[in-house]
Amino acid sequence: MPEGDTVFLLARRLNARLAGRTVERSDLRVPRFATADLRGARILGVASRGKHLLTRFAGPGAEPTTLHTHLRMDGEWTVLGPGKRLPHRLWPDVRVLLATDGPTAVALRMPVVELLPTAREADVVGHLGPDLLDGDRSVDDRVAAAVANLARRPERGLKAALLDQRNLAGLGNLWADELCFLRGRSPRTPVGEVELEPLVRLAVKLLTFSVGPSGAPQVTTGDTRPGRQHWVSGRAGKPCLRCGTTILVEAEVPGDAERRRTWWCPHCQPPGSPPGERAVT
């Protein structure tokens, strides 16, 4: 599943191509909204909230409307320039088509497609914790809110808590594994034993760099060579880039409803290590 920084970059690209455009033809190929017609609506912009995408419209004589989509594992947005056509083999995968007075945006294999009044966006994203990339909130505010949410269940395993979008929005499996390594904590460490503020600040810093103009998306080691971009994520059976110990993988994250895998270094992230003792900076 794409992580928050990936969805943020997607929203930025879609916004650059679509904001200000007028919809000339729309097609929402989901039963609930199959009769929806966005013709004549102006696209106000595209924004992300955690892993969710919000495309906002202003229609003539109608209240502002939001198209809510979520990629989950297989969804994809693509934008076609004027005169370009989607290959026929992909037409069965189309879930949303927005043909504008410029480019055409197409959502493929999109598992979540909802149309709702913009005033009711909280119905679909109101459950989320602070978005770590939310530029409308200060870093201190984002960090404080996330720390408060995480601290509510001190007995919970660290990685499972980081993956819970109700605590903080945007972290996925890769970032959660890398953050646990960088702070020198076992993924199973109870939240109550972790210094949460420096961990969340590091998360904000990493995601912000990942989406920045000079950043290398989702490279946590500073090394862009294949196989050396991450400290632990996806590196099961390989030597730790810091100490040489074999990286381990667990089939499921305890307490994670989505049953995602966990990678960690048993030497750099031993159970019960003091906060920051083995942190990598």
Image (spheres, rainbow, N blue to C red):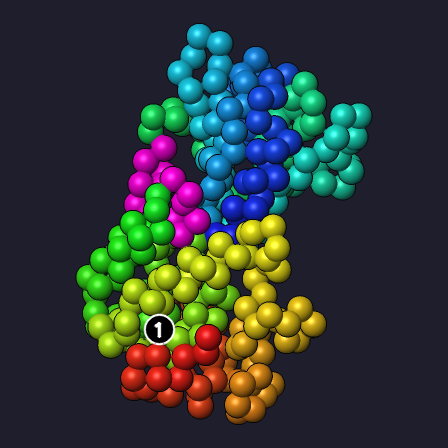
Residue, x 27% and y 60% (percent of image)?
A: 147
The number of numbered discs placed on residues in the rendered structure image is 1
Quadrant of the rendered image containing residue 124: top left
- In-front residue for pair 110/244: 244
Q: Is 254 above or below relative to 55?
A: below
Label 1 CA crowd tier, 10 Å (few <14, some 14–19, many 20+)? some
Determine the residue positioned at 47% across, 18% down: 58
Residue 161: percent from the left, percent from the top?
32, 65
Q: Is residue 237 visible?
A: no
Q: Nearer the viewer, residue 139 or 243?
A: 139
The vertical placement of 137 against 150, above or below, is above
Q: 193 or 34, which is in the foreground?
A: 193
Give the prevailing secondary structure in the magenta stretch: loop
Q: Is residue 121 above or below residue 154?
A: above
Task: Answer whether residue 183 is magenta in the image.
Answer: no
> Which amino acid, by three-letter code, is at mark 1?
Pro
The residue under label 1 is 254
Report x, y in % for residue 12.
Answer: 57, 40
Q: Position of residue 8 (x, y in %)?
A: 52, 46
In the figure, is residue 88 to the left or right of 232?
A: right
Q: Does the magenta portion include 123?
A: yes
> Residue at horizontal 34%, vertical 26%?
119
- Mark yes or no: residue 44 visible: yes
Image position of 79 with respect to 20: above or below: below
Residue 19: where, in percent of width, then height? 57, 27
SS for callout 1 = loop
Magenta segment range? Answer: 121-136
Q: Quadrant of residue 160?
A: bottom left
